[in-house]
Amino acid sequence: MPALERALDAHGTAVLCAPPGTGKTTLVPLVLAGLLDGGRPGAEVVVAEPRRIAARAAARRMAWLLGESVGGRVGFTVRGERVVGRDTVVEVVTTGVLLQRLQRDQELAGTDVVVLDECHERHLDADTVAAFLLDVRAALRPELRLSPPSATTDAEGWARLLGGAPVVEAEGVSHPVETVWAPPARPVRPPHGMRDDPRAAVARGRRGAQGARRAGGRRAVLPARRGRDRTGGRPAVRGRRRGAPGARAGSGRGAGHRTGRFRGYAQGGAGDLGGRVRALTVPGVRVVVDSGLAREPRTDHARGLSALTTVRASQAASRQRAGRAGREAPGVVYRCWDRADVVRLRASPPPRSRSRT
């Protein structure tokens, strides 16, 4: 944090790179706003999240860290819901809300710092917000500070985009993660288009994960709810009541599944579960079963409509998924594809043509 604050003071912009679970979403805004020890009070911080679930969960977590409820010094605004108060200095919004706010108030009056969380996902709204903020800094408010934190972002690319911004890196506690390659025993339909067939590979990986003698929970990363159902049940929710100990999310960041059909407790294990406020990073995961697939928006020009299609996940997404198994103790990741396919994966997700805010 001291290095990040020095970089923002000197350049106004800084790229923050830190592993998942180190506090990029929840601790950094509180320190920048002076709400925790080490920060300078008086700054108003806006945190932009790509999804409504993440915005609500981040606000709840930060408010819990301060011993308050949402709507005090920490609030959030998403489409159709706004929970802020007179004392709010940290506001978590979706990128779509921030984009509309910039269209109404180009100067973004009253805001001192903007944190573009999960900038590596490259949503259309997020990229447009970044472009608008660069224009605001160049023409209207050079004192506006801007920081895009991420665990898997192209740091050098963002640094060039922000005019030679410094890159601040933080090291997290990482335990060794064993990689088990679990390719399908027979060919499956290629993962591209409106349909996918992850059953053979992921079911095999899940069987291996169930046999692993490791304390803690398991997590299966599948591209959509349909894939979860077709793979032999819902790994996150089946057989467990809401708030039951050991419930694990089955999606994870970067999985790219539709979020509208799932409740908050199945969207990353964040927020208030049965009276227990948990971190945004799902605790207790020791085994990750990675399908190697993701859902990305594509435009069907014949119909003139956009839809989510199944594609191969990027190398950055695979590293992030595997890292979740080694957050608290040594873990194992079952990758449901062949080792030789790694070199053919894209280094990072491409910019998206459509946002799902």
Image (tube, rainbow, N blue to C red):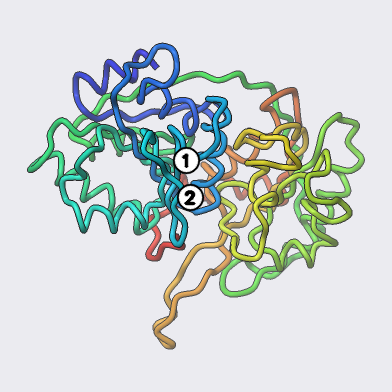
> Horizontally, is 291 left or right of 302 in the view?
right
Look at 79% across and 41% down and name the residue there.
Answer: 218
Q: Which of marks 2 and 1 is in front?
A: 1
Task: Give the CA separation, mark 2 to mark 1.
Answer: 41 Å
Task: Give the mark nearest the N terminus, 2 or 1.
Answer: 1
Q: What element carries label 1?
A: loop
Quarter occupied by the N terminus = top left
- Amino acid beneath label 1: Gly
Disc 1 residue crowd, few under 14, some 14–19, many 20+, Cα 10 Å: many
> Horizontally, is 123 left or right of 242 in the view?
left
The label shown at residue 346 is 2
The label shown at residue 99 is none
Residue toward you, 150 or 310: 150
* Quadrant hosting residue 339: top right
Look at 58% across and 38% down and name the residue there.
Answer: 319
Establish if 218 lies above or below 238. Answer: above
Q: Is mark 2 on a helix, strand or loop?
A: loop
Disc 2 residue crowd, few under 14, some 14–19, many 20+, Cα 10 Å: some
Q: Where is residue 99 in the image (x, y as percent from the top left)?
A: 29, 55
Residue toward you, 104 or 21: 104
Look at 60% across and 37% down and name the residue there.
Answer: 280
Residue toward you, 42 or 325: 42
Establish if 10 lies above or below 199. Answer: above
Q: Name the residue under label 1.
A: 71
Look at 40% across and 12% down and name the residue there.
Answer: 38
Q: Where is residue 102 in the image (x, y as percent from the top left)?
A: 23, 53
- Amino acid beneath label 2: Arg
**What residue occupies the far bottom of the structure in this picture?**
302
